[in-house]
Image: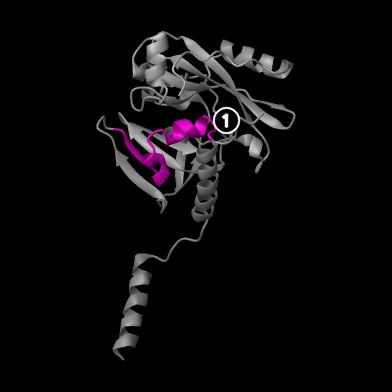
């Protein structure tokens, strides 16, 4: 999944993203470049807000959550590495398996714990390659190929 | 496992001292925490400083500096309700493939 930044100012965010606990204000400048594309490594939705984890312009070793209204979706293909997790409180997350097998994976990653840093480095490379890989054939074309193959088998 | 309060990390040089001052004076950016997904440290923070698990967030400095080739940022915990900030520490990221990027590296 690839998204493109359309604004990097807090004043373009809906009110729902300006709650005090998010620490954004209309004056917030996000470390994003307008027009630049970013690969999405995970995302979640909670209480009507959508957040993307991306390696923004201040990336060091962990992806950072950013409000979805700052972006437009360029490539909506879902990553093959993603799993879905719905929590009892309504938190819906899409992320790679390790994110869920250890409920504190991201917590540990941001703490710079060795295992989690290495896992994210590896997955980032895989997801970067995947995101910019060619689009698969449309379903109609794949179906046609299957039909042709079946006809060959039938003789 | 650490159970008590963790003191602020001491800066190693003047740029780190200035970065820490800036971090303490600013709001910072939220990394994670809150009611949707409490921190792993939340039970300890509640026991030491009070509040509820969902009150605590992990924050990062909006500014970073490059010191001796490492990108340095500051992390800390903040109580969303009271505004209390505790346990400031430095995170140093060295160029790719450096073993110093891992926890405990300097």
Q: Nearer the viewer, residue B64 or A135?
A: B64
Q: Is residue B50 above or below residue B92?
A: above
Q: Position of residue B15 (x, y in %)?
A: 71, 18
Q: Quadrant of residue A112?
A: top right
Label 1, secondary structure: give it: loop
Q: Is residue B53 toward the left or the right of residue B106 in the image?
A: left
User: Relative to the observer, which residue lies in front, A33 or B11?
Assistant: B11
Instruction: Identify whether B50 is placed above or below A27.
Output: above
Q: Is residue A104 part of the magenta span, yes or no? A: yes
**Position in image of residue A85 (x %, y %):** 31, 41
Q: Which residues are magenta?
A: A91-113
> Residue A49 location in percent, x, y?
35, 31
Residue A96 appears left or right of A37: left
What is the residue that sits farthest to the bottom in this orientation?
A155
The answer to if A13 sits in the magenta stretch is: no
Please, which chain is the residue tagged with disc 1 on?
A
**How would you rate the neighbour count of disc 1 (Cα within 10 Å): few for under 14, some for 14-19, many for 20 or more?**
some
Quadrant in which residue B97 is drawn:
top right
């Amino acid at each position: 999944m690839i998204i493109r930044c359309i604004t990097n100012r807090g004043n373009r965010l809906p009110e729902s993203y300006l709650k005090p606990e998010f620490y954004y204000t209309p004056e917030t400048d996000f470390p994003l470049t307008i027009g630049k594309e970013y690969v999405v490594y995970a995302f979640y939705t909670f209480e009507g807000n959508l957040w993307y984890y991306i390696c923004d312009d201040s990336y060091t070793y962990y992806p950072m959550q950013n409000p979805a209204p700052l972006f437009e979706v360029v490539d909506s293909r879902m990553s093959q590495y993603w799993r879905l997790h719905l929590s009892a409180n309504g938190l819906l997350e899409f992320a790679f398996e390790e994110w869920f097998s250890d409920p504190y994976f991201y917590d540990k990653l941001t703490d710079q714990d060795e295992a989690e840093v290495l896992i994210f480095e590896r997955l980032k490379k895989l997801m970067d390659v995947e995101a910019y890989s060619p689009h698969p054939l449309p379903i109609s074309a794949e179906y046609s190929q299957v039909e042709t193959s079946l006809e060959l088998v039938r003789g | 496992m650490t159970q008590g309060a963790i003191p602020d990390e001491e800066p190693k040089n003047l740029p780190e001292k200035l970065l820490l001052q800036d971090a303490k004076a600013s709001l910072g950016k939220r990394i994670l925490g809150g009611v949707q997904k409490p921190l792993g440290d939340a039970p300890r923070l509640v026991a030491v400083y009070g509040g509820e698990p969902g009150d605590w967030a992990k924050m990062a400095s909006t500014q970073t500096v490059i010191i001796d080739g490492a990108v340095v940022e500051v992390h800390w915990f903040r109580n969303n309700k009271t505004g209390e900030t505790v346990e400031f520490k430095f995170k140093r990221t060295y160029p790719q493939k450096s073993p110093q990027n891992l926890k405990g590296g300097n």
